[in-house]
Amino acid sequence: MTEVSDWRFRRYRYRLIGSRCRECGETSYPPRRRCSRCGGATEEYQLPRRGRVVHYTLLKALPTRYNHYRPYFLAVVELSDGTRVIGMLTDVDEPSEGMEVEATLRKLYTYGEDGKIIYGVKFRPVL
Amino acid sequence: MRPTREVGIYGYGAYIPRYIIENRDIADLWGRDATPIKSKSFPSYDEDTITIAYEAALRAIESSGADPSLIGAVFIGSESKPYAVKPSGTVVAEALGLGRNILSADYEFACKAGTEAMQTVFGLVSSGMIRMGLAIGADTAQGRPGDELEYTAAAGGAAYIISRVEDGVLARLEASYTYVSDTPDFWRRSLEEYPRHLYRFTGEPAYFHHIMSSVKGLFEEYGYSPSDFKYAVFHQPNYKFPTRVAKKLGFTMDQIKPGLVVALVGNTYSGSSLLGLAATLDVAEPGDKILLASFGSGAGSDSMVFEVTDLIEERRMRPPVSKLISRMIPGDYATYAMFRDILRR
Amino acid sequence: MGMPVIAGYGFTRVGEHWDRGLKDLSLEAIEKVFEGMSSVEIDAIYVGTALSGFYELQLSLASHIADLIARFDASVSNFEAGAASSAQAFYNAALGILSGMYKAVLVGGVEKMSDELPAPNYRGVSLVEDSFLVNYSGMTEIGLHALLAKMYLSEYGLEEPLYSYLPVNEHENASRAGHAQFRNRITYDMVRSASPVSDPLTIFDVTAPGDGAAYILLMDREYADSLGVEYVKLLGMGAAGQPANLFDRASPLFFSASSRAVEKALEKAGVETEDIGLLEMYNPSSISGVLVLESLGLADKGGAGKLLERGYFSLSGELPVNTFGGAKARGDPKGATAAYQLAEAAMQLLGRAGDNQVDGAEYALVHSMVGLDISAYAFVLGV
């Protein structure tokens, strides 16, 4: 991903826009063009912002672009419509399974001091 | 100033980051006694003015049920824009799923940029150029380590959806006023990281003179007096200034108390008076009149009079500002320094 | 023309080869392939590498390997698919020989991971996963494995992460393997009490970066016979895939690509699962290894840990797995990893495994996968 290609994905990155199969209704995030279950064509689908933490892990082996601060929580979040997604948790010190969370917009990484700031969805406890 | 067609607040939202640092911790570090407030908020490492503006605006849209497709403008007032050149509003608009046919710009007038954005949207909505507009004041204000500002410079913001009264508002704008002069009490040169200020000069000739001139001008032109208002909100750079200016203008503590969030939250700059207004709307009842008076260094003050309508009950922000504050947790100076990029890895 | 044979192999020790690069490591491995062999005509050179374009900034690696050994008459092909890079190369090399076009293909892989720091490595090895998720959700391969471990423990109601007996077994096997990166013996308690990398996984539950090169000489059987070399037969192979996104799968805990690839390979070879004498599987973590075993039907769902605990998959157990330590202990130089697995399986079948020799193995199964089972490859070898 580059400062250009990040732009192409901004809607999906900012807004939890996933996909839904026109045939069988299967939902996915990130969006897919063809349904993984039935092969049917999909359409864009606005996923619900709220959900709950199903599983989480404190990632200590930090990768490039995400290694400037502390270890972070990576979680499986089940959104209120049942769709499961993987995302970072923020504003949380001790998550718990079942914790109610909602999607928000946060800084993901930057391209250095003079480069673009990349924003995207993270999950934080419901206010 | 009064718009040709009546306008008002359709919905409002606020956001304060989760972390606070106690003034005591800052004072102990620098060996000083001064603690102008109790604590101030600071943003997490992954927050900035854009994300705070987004949070506040999202809350405004969700709590009011406003149709995002009717929003024709996003103006963000801030003195801590993430980019020197590149609009913040386009990110916020895209993230909120607003249309592409919208006006957007970042406003800067020190702490007054938020109400400046409101005044602009009042005009655009009243003229019929747009149906609804978002005016946001948000900041992640920076104080140089050890400087007086470090005790108060905080992070937070509030967003207001402005519409015509006929579209249904929770508070009707009765009148507004503005007063500006070339009074440099606080500034930041373009490549500097931290602002400079002139200590006590920020008081009498700056904060007090401009707010008093603005509010008195409003009262004289439209015939108001302090007793007409259930509540009043003044820009709150610390606890002392707003309480003193209220007293000087003839307002009581009861009138300003609901909107006085500075003691725990700090000075959220462009978000400051707007956050105070949000906290006030959280408790206001139909028929209440509210005075809002901002202040921006440089210097100027916008005054506005709102009358709360019956729609307030169903459009109140969820959760209220008091909940945003009660969820906050203390961070130590090291965490503050890391999240504020004072301490870099 | 027919199923090809493995007529030679060569590899370097896996480790941190600070003073040697992609070409140096490749040359050592390739020279070992041809050791003691009279001149062989190479029709093609197939090279797998996961990260050479990132780390040594060398692209089109196969061209440069051909240049390295001055085999300018050979056609060259590059394969990039994480730890399955050289499995992909091997699969296609076999097709080349099956087609009748080639009599001999030099196929293998190389990786030089110690050239990078931890953060780029954690990111680099994750890039086989969906790039949207890796870039925008903060997900990494290790994080994904940790979440899978959580799902696994919760799904089967397991209190103890017995999957951590797998690295114990792998380190035990590697302790006798000269080419292994980690030859220290470890215990279950050591795995559990080691530093967490992403809970519940510790540093001993996941593979580490390593440098290494492994190459194989794949040949048409008649050509091998004419040269009089000892060989191992490739009896069957299979490949399959599934959605990269765990939640687009029927079950995140079932590696359907691995299962299907193995099914195809066994069917092609005409060999039953019960006839397999040893398994060289690819598992970049303890949990993924257990999921491979369970997905291949070699253990009950949720039950592989118990079998591991009682030594079922150890060298002297019912089904020896990762007989030289696997990716965890032999080492995981991504692009080369599958070539190591194939070479090690060949050593076992040829009776050249030394202290690690599995007795009486007639058939070996080699399994490889891209990321978390996005694509999988399986090969059945026999003598």
Image: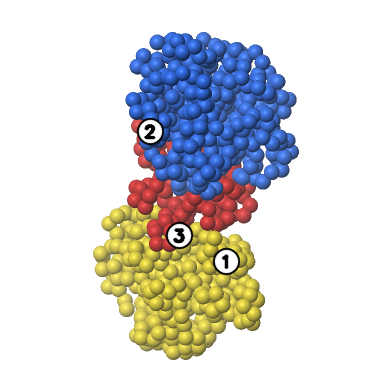
Residue positioned 57% across, 24% down in the render: C344
> Camera-side residue: B205 or A119?
A119
Which structural element holds mark 1? helix
Image quadrant occupied by the C terminus of chain C: top right
- Counting from the top left corner in percent of width and height, residue C362 is at 60, 12
User: Which-is-in-front pick, marks 3 and 1?
Assistant: 1
On what subunit does the disc labeled 2 rest? C
Query: Which chain did the renderer colour blue?
Result: C
Q: Mark 2: which amino acid?
A: Asp
The verdict on a common chain for dots 3 and 2 is no
Q: Name the residue type under label 1.
A: Tyr
Disc 2: which residue? C67
Q: Which residue is pictured at 54% across the width and 60% down the height? A: B345
* Residue A54 visible in this rendered orientation of the protein: no
Which chain gets the yellow colouring? Answer: B
Which residue has dot 3 on it? B51
The amino acid pointed to by label 3 is: Thr
In the image, B327: left or right of A45?
Answer: right
Q: Are the residues tagged 1 and 2 within 8 Å (C-beta)?
A: no
Q: Residues within 10 Å of mark 1 (few under 14, many from 20)?
A: many
Q: Which mark is residue B336?
A: 1
Q: Quadrant of the N terminus of chain C?
A: top left
Q: Can the viewer see residue B21 in this picture? A: yes
Question: Is B100 left or right of C343, judged from the image as shown?
Answer: left
Disc 3 crowd rating (10 Å Cα; few below 14, some 14-19, many 20+) is many
Q: CA distance from mark 1 to mark 2?
A: 56 Å
CB under 8 Å between discs 3 and 1 = no
Q: Residue at x 58, y 20 (%)?
A: C347
